[in-house]
């Protein structure tokens, strides 16, 4: 399958979102299409979106930044978090720089940064000033 | 040369350039363009000799002149871009008239063969030195010759090390050119490619987890192919290149993504030898491009069996 | 003159100490911990991690995290311990050019001394940061059973790390030095060392500042890790019962479980019950799953009783070797964090018929002993006299492939012993002396330490010439051997430079590589 093949309208919509500055939403949409008929093409867009978002995540959360938990106990448990996010939360100590957290997690660095950004967005984790 | 012949030559994994009877270039196949980093637009009309580095120019010039004058094919060795070639310059004849020349460059292993021969030749003097040192050791067995004995023992130890390195050299040289088939960690390969590219371009980075399922094939060949792919893309001057790796179903997805600030990067065509290397890994190659995002070349490589 | 430090280079954790104003100080690392995990890792982006950072990602990056490399140091690739490590360790162990085991991580094969050096360099750095001055000299401890090659390789590691190793000291001896420091007692002591990955027991005799190791025994594959593994297994089973989810294939979950198991184990030494809480340990389409399991001391003890019993069997063997009864031992010193467990303390007390000495910290005692020894080697005051034993029998290969023991194991060092040998052929003019270490009667089954040829023997009938072969073992446990033809007086000798250790050139090459790497690191920071 090549780039010349016509992508689905959803794929086009995802690309429009990128132009509107909604690259994260675009990636989520593209990921949901991964099982579709344009498998290889979708994977290609996924790769490009991941590479592009990685840079955004790094700008938002620099390598040297330090994070700590904002919520504990039942407040924390009320969230519907994936295991990867739970693992990252368990590693937060307010001292380890983000770049080390990502390396130590052993996770795909993109997934680790994405989870950390989401945790900050959800108010579960905060930057140590 | 008609279109059909040209299209056949396009697929030859051997650098080839065609010139007219005046000794100017007319056409070169993609392998030649890649190896000699030529701009296809400016190729036509360039004197053939000028396509080569300083040391080889005179020999090319002479060979082309001889062939164009109706002489026999000329063969000589030349070295370009770290590769050794046997150059074959032949005439294109219409009737009895020479209307052009073809220069075919066959890669040779002469350099490696010479090294291997030297490595073999080393064994004989090493054996002789060992016999001499053994003899000396016997004569320095007593306490009074303690200092000399220690020196001889040092000599024997040094000799053992030379032997070991010589053997390693032999193994490396003999292994060259052959394709091994082993299980390997794709992340380690990607890391090496990124590290070596980062020496010259700081905007190349890797995006991969700590470990991935093993692949089966020759890791050196994959490393080489990825390096070539990267070189070709760096030449197109993208804003950033990301080498990615992750699991996709029962495959490992390797990707070379070129991110652009605006528009698409220049057209790219990976050479047949790169394609061969990827085919050995049973990789399915796809390219996806969009002016809003950039271009990504995807290699879907099956995981090694038993995972 | 710069300070001399004492380093306990452990299988699982390492510790560094120094004497300040006559008192030993255990030096904490930047994180405030007095012990540092003996781990080295390379992350996917090429970062080199040592100590706690390496441990934190040990399971999620298991293929590129080296632990317990001490089990491999100075051994041959074909040695059973190496083969067992290959089966057990997630990282790749490959055969090196000297038939030594090498560990491949991050695309590079590291020698065992190189890995040891990484840990030692970290300990050196910790000491330098604390002391505010460069450190160049050290005393390093090794297990009492380490043979000549293993000791030599440990010295190589020190050299690569930029340390001049003044003395290699046996770990139980160091523990006894720490215990006997400033005491003038006459006692027989058992040092029961249950560390993270290994178990060693030694029986020593102290009198008037002289420490003699009477016997030593151990198991290189038994330690606190076995306790942790059993707890993790229990937690996995419980969680599977509760949630029908098997976490065995989930590296992130296993990393959290391992950390939690270690913490629960430590907490249960002071409490009867703990709760292991790991929120968001897994998730499925129904949402996140949390692990919450109660673990009490009784359950823990039932999980690990088998391991504790195994240590007692080894202790029995050691006491037998020393020629004593368990009741003859007057003091028991506990070494290694795992001995904090009440079950272990009780088992040891029951075995020896007395409670263990409480005056020393089990995690730090070996490093403290090394620091005291370091000080005594450099000061002009009266020093503690060390009398160690050779852990393995020493001898030579004789006709028919037999092994002739010249020095039995557990013989006190320094020692010199000799024996008369003769020729096996008519008019034999030379003999080859093959120096071996081990307990088998068959020469080939023991470790070859080195070999040399004695030439110029006068022509005679077989069995007539008399060749005096002598062994010397110095205080570091390093072996020298000489052979003398009594008729001609011709002599030949070697300081055993064990096969499999690194040559000076190789060590220099590694040091240069490390220096190159250090430059690269600084550039990376910018």
Image (cartoon, rainbow, N blue to C red):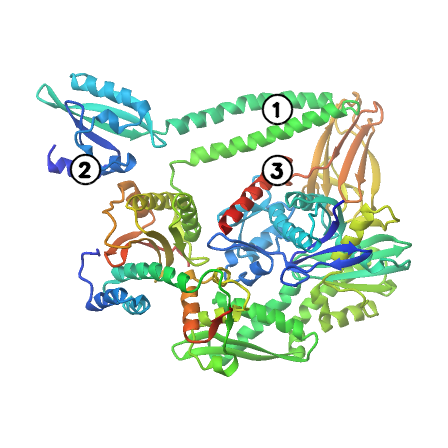
Element carrying mark 1: helix
Residue closest to the eye, C320 or B196:
B196
Subunit of label 2: B
Horizontal arrangement in the rendering, residue C295 relative to residue C524 (left or right): right
Q: Identify the residue under disc 3.
A: C508
Label 3 – label 1 distance at C-alpha: 25 Å
- Look at the picture and state if C330 lies above or below B187: below
Residue B40 coordinates in the image, percent (x, y): 20, 37
- Assess disc 2: are there few (<14), some (14-19) or many (≥20) residues with their C-alpha within 10 Å of its C-alpha: few
Q: Which residue is mark 2?
A: B41
Q: Nearer the viewer, residue B269 or B211?
A: B269
Relative placement, left or right, of B224 versus C289 is left
Task: Please tell me whether residue C275 is drawn above or below residue C309 in the rendered image.
Answer: below
The 10 Å Cα crowd at callout 3, few under 14, some 14 to 19, many 20 or more, is some
Q: Is A38 located above or below residue C147 in the figure? A: below
Q: For residue B108, what is the image quadrant?
A: top left
Mark 3–mark 2 Cα distance, whole angstroms, equals 53 Å
Identify the mark at residue B130; answer none if there is no mark: 1
**Identity of the residue drawn at 86% across and 56% down:** C205
Judge whether residue C41 can be spotted in this image.
yes
Label 2: state its secondary structure.
Answer: helix
Q: Is residue B230 above or below residue A89?
A: above
Identify the chain of the residue marked 1, using the numbered disc in the image.
B
- Tell me the CA gap for discs 1 and 2: 61 Å
Q: Give the quarter of the figure containing the N terminus of chain C.
A: top right
The percent coordinates of residue C33 (x first, y second) are 66, 63
Q: Residue drawn 70% across and 24% down?
A: B137
Of C68 and B202, the residue lying toward us? B202
Q: Which mark is residue B244?
A: none
Dot 1: few (<14), some (14–19), or many (≥20) neighbours within 10 Å? some
The answer to whether marks 1 and 2 sit on the same chain is yes
For marks 1 and 2, the one nearer the N-term is: 2
């Amino acid at each position: 399958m090549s780039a010349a093949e016509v992508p689905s309208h959803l794929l086009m919509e995802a690309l429009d979102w990128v132009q509107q500055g909604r690259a994260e939403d675009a990636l989520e949409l593209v990921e949901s299409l991964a099982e579709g008929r344009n498998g290889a093409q979708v994977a290609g867009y996924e790769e490009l979106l991941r590479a592009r978002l990685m840079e955004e995540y790094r700008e938002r959360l620099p390598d040297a930044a330090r994070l700590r938990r904002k919520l504990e106990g039942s407040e924390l448990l009320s969230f519907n978090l994936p295991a990867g996010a739970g693992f990252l939360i368990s590693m937060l100590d307010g001292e380890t720089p983000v770049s080390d957290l990502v390396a130590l997690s052993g996770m795909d660095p993109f997934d680790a940064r994405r989870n950390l950004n989401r945790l900050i967005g959800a108010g579960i984790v905060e930057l140590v000033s | 040369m008609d279109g059909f012949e040209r299209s056949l030559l396009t697929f030859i994994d051997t650098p080839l350039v065609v010139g007219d009877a005046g000794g100017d270039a007319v056409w070169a196949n993609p392998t030649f363009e890649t190896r000699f980093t030529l701009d296809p637009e400016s190729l036509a009309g360039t004197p053939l000799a000028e396509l080569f580095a300083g040391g080889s120019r005179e020999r090319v010039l002479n060979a082309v002149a001889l062939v164009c004058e109706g002489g026999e094919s000329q063969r000589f060795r030349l070295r370009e871009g770290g590769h050794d070639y046997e150059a074959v310059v032949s005439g294109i004849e219409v009737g009895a008239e020479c209307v052009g020349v073809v220069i075919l460059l066959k890669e040779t292993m002469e350099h490696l063969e010479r090294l291997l021969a030297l490595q073999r030749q080393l064994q004989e003097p090493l054996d002789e030195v060992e016999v001499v040192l053994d003899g000396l050791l016997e004569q320095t067995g007593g306490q009074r010759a303690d200092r000399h004995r220690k020196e001889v023992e040092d000599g024997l130890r040094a000799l053992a090390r030379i032997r070991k390195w010589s053997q390693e050299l032999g193994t490396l040289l003999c292994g060259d050119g052959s394709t091994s088939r082993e299980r390997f960690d794709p992340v380690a390969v990607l890391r090496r490619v990124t590290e070596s590219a980062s020496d010259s371009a700081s905007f190349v980075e890797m995006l991969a987890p700590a470990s991935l399922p093993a692949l089966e094939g020759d890791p050196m060949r994959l490393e080489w192919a990825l390096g070539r792919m990267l070189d070709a893309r760096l030449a197109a001057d993208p804003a950033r290149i990301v080498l990615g790796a992750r699991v996709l179903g029962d495959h490992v997805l390797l990707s070379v993504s070129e991110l652009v600030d605006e528009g698409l990067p220049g057209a790219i065509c990976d050479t047949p030898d790169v394609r061969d290397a990827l085919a050995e890994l049973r990789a399915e190659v796809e390219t996806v491009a969009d002016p809003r995002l950039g271009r990504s070349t995807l290699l879907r490589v099956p995981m090694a069996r038993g995972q | 003159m710069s300070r001399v430090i004492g380093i306990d280079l452990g299988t699982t954790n390492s510790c560094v100490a120094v004497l300040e104003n006559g008192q030993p100080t255990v030096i904490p690392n930047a994180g405030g911990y007095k012990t540092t995990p003996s781990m080295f890792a390379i992350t996917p982006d090429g970062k080199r991690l040592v100590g706690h950072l390496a441990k934190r990602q040990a399971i999620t990056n298991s293929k590129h995290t080296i632990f317990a490399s001490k089990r491999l140091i100075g051994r041959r690739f074909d040695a059973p311990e190496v083969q067992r490590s290959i089966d057990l360790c997630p990282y790749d162990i490959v055969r090196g050019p000297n038939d030594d085991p090498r560990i491949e991580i991050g695309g590079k094969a590291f020698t065992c001394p190189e890995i040891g050096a990484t840990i030692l360099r970290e300990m050196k750095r910790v000491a330098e940061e604390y002391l505010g001055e460069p450190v160049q000299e050290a005393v390093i401890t090794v297990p009492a059973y380490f043979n000549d090659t293993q000791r030599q390789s440990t010295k190589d590691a020190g050299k690569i790390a930029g340390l001049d190793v003044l003395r290699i000291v046996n770990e139980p001896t160091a523990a006894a030095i720490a215990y006997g420091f400033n005491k003038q007692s006459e006692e027989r002591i058992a040092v029961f060392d249950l560390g993270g990955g290994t178990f060693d027991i030694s029986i020593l005799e102290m009198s008037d500042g002289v420490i003699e190791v009477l016997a030593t025994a151990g198991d290189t594959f038994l330690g606190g890790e076995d306790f942790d593994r059993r707890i993790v297994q229990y937690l996995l089973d419980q969680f599977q019962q509760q949630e029908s989810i098997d976490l065995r294939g989930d590296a992130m979950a296993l990393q959290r479980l391992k950390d939690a198991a270690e913490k629960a184990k430590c907490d249960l030494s002071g409490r009867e019950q703990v709760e292991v809480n790991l929120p968001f340990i897994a998730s499925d389409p129904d949402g996140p799953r949390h692990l919450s399991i109660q673990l009490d001391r009784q359950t823990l003890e039932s999980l690990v009783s088998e391991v504790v019993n195994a240590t007692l069997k080894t202790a029995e063997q050691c006491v037998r070797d020393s020629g004593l009864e368990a009741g003859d031992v007057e003091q028991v010193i506990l070494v290694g964090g795992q001995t904090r467990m009440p079950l272990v303390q009780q088992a040891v007390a029951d075995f020896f018929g007395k409670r263990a000495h409480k005056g020393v910290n089990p995690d730090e005692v070996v490093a403290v002993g090394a620091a005291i020894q370091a000080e005594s080697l450099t000061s002009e005051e009266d020093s503690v006299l060390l009398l160690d034993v050779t852990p393995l029998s020493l001898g030579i290969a004789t006709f028919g492939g037999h092994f002739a023991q010249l020095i039995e194991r557990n013989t006190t060092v320094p020692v010199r012993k000799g024996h008369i040998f003769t020729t096996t052929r008519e008019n034999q003019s030379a003999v080859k002396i093959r120096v071996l270490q081990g307990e088998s009667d068959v020469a080939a089954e023991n470790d070859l330490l080195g070999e040399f040829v004695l030439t110029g023997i006068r022509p005679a009938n077989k069995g007539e010439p008399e060749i005096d072969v002598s062994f010397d073992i110095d205080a570091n446990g390093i072996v020298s051997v000489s052979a003398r033809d009594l008729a001609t007086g011709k002599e030949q000798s070697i300081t055993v430079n064990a096969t499999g250790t690194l040559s000076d050139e190789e060590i220099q090459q590694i040091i240069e590589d490390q220096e190159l790497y250090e430059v690269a690191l600084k550039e990376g920071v910018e």
